[in-house]
């Protein structure tokens, strides 16, 4: 084992750091609505124009084809510089839809969509979960029938993050009538402006409404929009999820380290109701130290996983270990900060920028639920890492 | 940058695992009081000198290999005396004859774990140990031990001897300044704690596959599966951090102390929580003497008490200073801080 960075990696870090220093937006991202989406598109266009778009995309498709280690370096520098968070309205396009089209799409689909995704011109949303198909995704019921060279879709999707801003949607639907579970599904590109689509925002406990329920009433989608084979949408969808559990969250993993250091600084100047500094409180100090140790372990685990991939291994269920550790650590951190802040924490009127720490606290439950709940991650670990007898 | 074992490192880990699994099955500890150190066998196979300089007759390997050995030693709740022996060699490395005797396993070393202001000492090891070792953040001391006046007291971990006496039994032979031995001790004990945590996970996973209740293996119930998954997460976090910390120490990275302290906290958490869950998930058999789960619990309790308190680890992780003075890293003398090395910050 060794912790040395090559000359090329060190040079890359310096180049990334210098560029970020001169180019990150000065104003904070507007919290909601079109203004937030426009901010994301502008930042993505800037990354694209300066050659920083598509870090993990192959060179052949306009990406940078960076090694996993250089992706780590990029995200470390972004976190350090306070660059706009990469999980924004461009995330599904860059981290799900684009890589899926690269893996399974036609040449026409690639030629049309990939450049638009990289430049921030197209925003995407996901259409997988349904009101009665969440953790058990394969029980989904939204269906389409083939009519000529089109699919006609009826049904309901939910948790459609940023659906109101998206141009396209990765839509997973049942195309074989009477099919069950993973069979008979199709992954299709849905134009969000097609007639028959209704997007209804869901207000969350954070007070915002960036997630939605999406209704499909005889929505017509060209068969040419099917990605992969018709009827093998599960296979296409899994190529996306496997990608997400590989390197899709590296940035979040590393940003935690900056967040915990900010919390330590906060504890050094925040007085508890008793009058003592938070950092001098042994309970708070002990919990902070353990959270910091976990963030260091998350960073080490990131290096361990990319090293194992480099040696020819498959991250597999280790991605679930990572998701559990990252989300539980983030939750512990935001809850500790909430306790330190006393009444100031309560002065939340629904604006994320005014009270980001209160927002983070509320968000921590989204984190342990979205993208596979902690309970589902434990099932995956029990099945695939520990080889325990199946529960289902 | 590689944070996975290379072929040579894997070979060391495999060799240690094979030797220890054959020669030190956990079963040996049942009923037996005072597990023999068997230093001669460790010496003959080169394990005592794994990371000692070649000039002293060692293999000249580094901190990573030493960590891998202690991880395997932890898995079998192996002789604690081996830890004292290897750290004593590190302390006495400028005293050739002493090192030669220690590497040969000819004279055993007790670990001094308490030394109160009124002159009372407590050590782990038999009263007839020739030497006693004290390791602290500021330095390490090796003493000649005259234990004739020291009394053995009962120990929760029945496989070790624990003695109490007066510090007049100690005469100092060697003292080394700096935190070199301390860092090493923390990595080694973290590795043993991780080994215990891993073994606890293996034990319950095996049992969950064979034990049936209500007509199904208990491993099919989420009430058992999910705590097992949490045990695996604790092991994986502690393992990755320990690998990173051992490598940082080997390379004398400026953030090595912080990385080691994080590894120590996470290994301790994994050992405590996993030995607990292992007993609970086993049900009644878990609290019996004939079953091995309690051996891991008791060893974890011994190990996490060694080498300072978690409080010290907390302080260095939060960028605070030890009361006894500023913590420095052995070779380059840089201060412990919250900055990760290798980023040109």
Image (cartoon, rainbow, N blue to C red):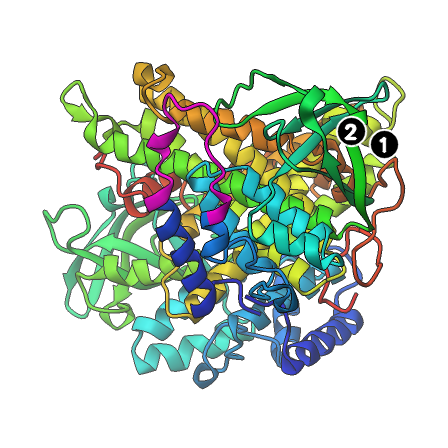
Q: Is residue A263 above or below residue A243?
A: above
Q: Which mark is residue A292?
A: none
The residue pinned by badge 2 equals A341
Q: Residues within 10 Å of mark 2 (few under 14, many from 20)?
A: some
On what subunit does the disc labeled 1 rest?
A: A
Classify residue B199 as left or right of residue A357: left
Q: Residue at x 65, y 47 (%)?
A: B87
> What's the magenta region?
B22-40
Q: Is residue A104 above or below residue A239?
A: below
Q: Residue B158, percent across and down?
A: 49, 22
Mark 1–mark 2 contact, CB under 8 Å?
Answer: yes
**Callout 1: helix, strand or loop?**
loop
On what subunit does the disc labeled 2 rest?
A: A
**Callout 2: helix, strand or loop?**
helix
Classify residue A313 as left or right of residue A136: right
Give residue B254's quadrant in the image: bottom right
> If you read the primary sequence from the N terminus, does the residue marked by circle 1 or circle 2 appear first?
1
Q: Residue A330, percent across and down?
A: 60, 41
The residue most toward the left is A178
Is residue B33 rendered magenta in the image? Answer: yes
The residue most toward the bottom is A60
Q: Residue at x 39, y 22 (%)?
A: B279
Q: Which mark is residue A270?
A: 1
Instruction: Answer whether residue B292 is visible to the viewer in this image.
Output: yes
From the viewer's side, name the closer residue of A194 and A372.
A372
Q: Residue at x 39, y 20 (%)?
A: B280
Position of the C terminus of chain B by quadrant: bottom right
Q: Label 1, label 2: how many angstroms apart (C-alpha)? A: 7 Å
């Amino acid at each position: 084992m060794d912790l040395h960075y090559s000359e090329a990696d060190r040079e890359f870090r310096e180049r990334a750091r210098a560029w970020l220093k001169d180019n990150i937006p000065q104003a904070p991202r507007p919290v909601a609505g079109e203004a937030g989406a426009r901010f994301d598109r502008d930042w993505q266009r800037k990354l694209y124009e300066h050659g920083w778009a598509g870090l993990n995309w192959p060179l052949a498709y306009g990406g940078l084809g960076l090694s996993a280690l250089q992706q780590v370096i990029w995200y470390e520098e972004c976190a350090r510089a306070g660059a706009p968070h990469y999980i924004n309205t461009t995330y599904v396009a860059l981290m799900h839809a684009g890589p899926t089209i690269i893996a399974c799409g036609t040449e026409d689909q690639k030629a049309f969509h990939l450049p638009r995704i990289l430049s921030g011109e197209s925003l995407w949303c996901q259409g997988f979960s349904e009101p009665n198909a969440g953790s058990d995704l394969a029980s989904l019921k939204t269906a389409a029938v083939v009519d000529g060279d089109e699919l006609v879709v009826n049904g309901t999707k939910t948790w459609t993050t940023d659906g109101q801003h998206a141009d396209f949607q990765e839509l997973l639907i049942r195309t074989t009538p009477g099919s069950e579970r993973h069979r008979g599904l199709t992954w299709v590109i849905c134009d969000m402006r097609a007639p028959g689509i209704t997007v209804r925002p869901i207000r969350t406990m954070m007070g915002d409404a960036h997630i939605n329920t999406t209704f499909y009433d005889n929505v017509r989608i060209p068969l040419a929009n099917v990605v992969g084979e018709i009827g093998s949408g599960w296979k296409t969808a899994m190529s996306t999820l496997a990608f997400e559990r590989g390197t899709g969250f590296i940035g979040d993993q590393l940003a935690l380290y900056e967040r915990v250091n900010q919390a330590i600084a906060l504890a050094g100047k925040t007085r508890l109701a008793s009058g003592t500094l938070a950092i001098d409180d042994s309970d708070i100090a002990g919990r902070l130290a353990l959270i910091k140790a976990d963030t260091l372990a998350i960073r080490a685990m990131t290096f361990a996983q990319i090293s194992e991939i480099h040696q020819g291994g498959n991250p597999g269920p280790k991605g679930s270990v990572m998701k559990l550790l990252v989300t539980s650590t983030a939750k512990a951190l935001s809850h500790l900060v909430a306790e330190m802040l006393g009444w100031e924490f309560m002065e939340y009127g629904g604006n994320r920028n005014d009270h980001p720490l209160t927002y983070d606290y509320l968000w921590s439950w989204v984190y342990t639920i979205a993208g596979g709940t902690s309970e589902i991650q434990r099932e995956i670990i029990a099945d695939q890492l520990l080889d325990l007898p199946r529960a289902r | 940058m590689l944070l996975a074992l290379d072929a040579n490192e894997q070979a060391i880990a495999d060799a240690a695992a094979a030797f220890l699994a054959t020669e030190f099955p956990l079963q040996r500890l049942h009923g037996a009081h005072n597990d023999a150190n068997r230093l001669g066998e460790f010496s003959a196979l080169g394990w005592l000198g794994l990371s000692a300089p070649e000039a002293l007759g060692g293999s000249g390997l580094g901190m990573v290999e030493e960590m891998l050995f202690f991880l395997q030693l932890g898995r079998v709740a192996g002789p604690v005396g081996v830890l004292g022996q290897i750290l004593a060699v590190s302390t006495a490395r400028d005293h050739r004859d002493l090192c030669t005797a220690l590497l040969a396993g000819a004279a055993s070393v007790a670990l001094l774990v308490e030394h109160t202001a009124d002159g009372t000492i407590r050590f782990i090891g038999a009263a007839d140990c020739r030497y006693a070792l004290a390791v602290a953040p500021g330095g390490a001391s090796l003493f000649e031990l005259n234990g004739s006046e020291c009394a053995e007291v009962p120990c929760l971990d029945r496989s070790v001897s624990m003695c109490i006496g007066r510090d007049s039994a100690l005469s100092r032979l060697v003292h080394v300044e700096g935190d070199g031995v301390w860092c090493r001790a923390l990595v080694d004990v973290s590795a043993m704690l991780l080994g215990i945590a891993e073994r606890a996970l293996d034990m319950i996973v095996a049992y969950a596959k064979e034990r049936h209740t209500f007509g199904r293996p208990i491993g099919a119930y989420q009430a058992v599966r999910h705590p097992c998954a949490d045990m695996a997460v604790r092991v994986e976090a502690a393992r990755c951090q320990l690998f990173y910390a051992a490598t940082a120490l080997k390379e004398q990275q400026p953030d090595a102390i912080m990385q080691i302290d994080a590894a120590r906290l996470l290994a301790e958490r994994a050992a405590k929580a996993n030995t607990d869950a292992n007993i609970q998930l086993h049900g009644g058999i878990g609290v019996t003497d004939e079953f091995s789960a309690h051996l891991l619990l008791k060893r974890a309790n011994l190990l996490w008490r060694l080498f300072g308190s978690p409080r010290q680890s907390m302080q260095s992780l939060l960028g605070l200073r030890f009361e006894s003075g500023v913590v420095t890293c052995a070779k380059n003398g840089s201060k412990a801080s919250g900055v990760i090395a290798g980023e040109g910050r």
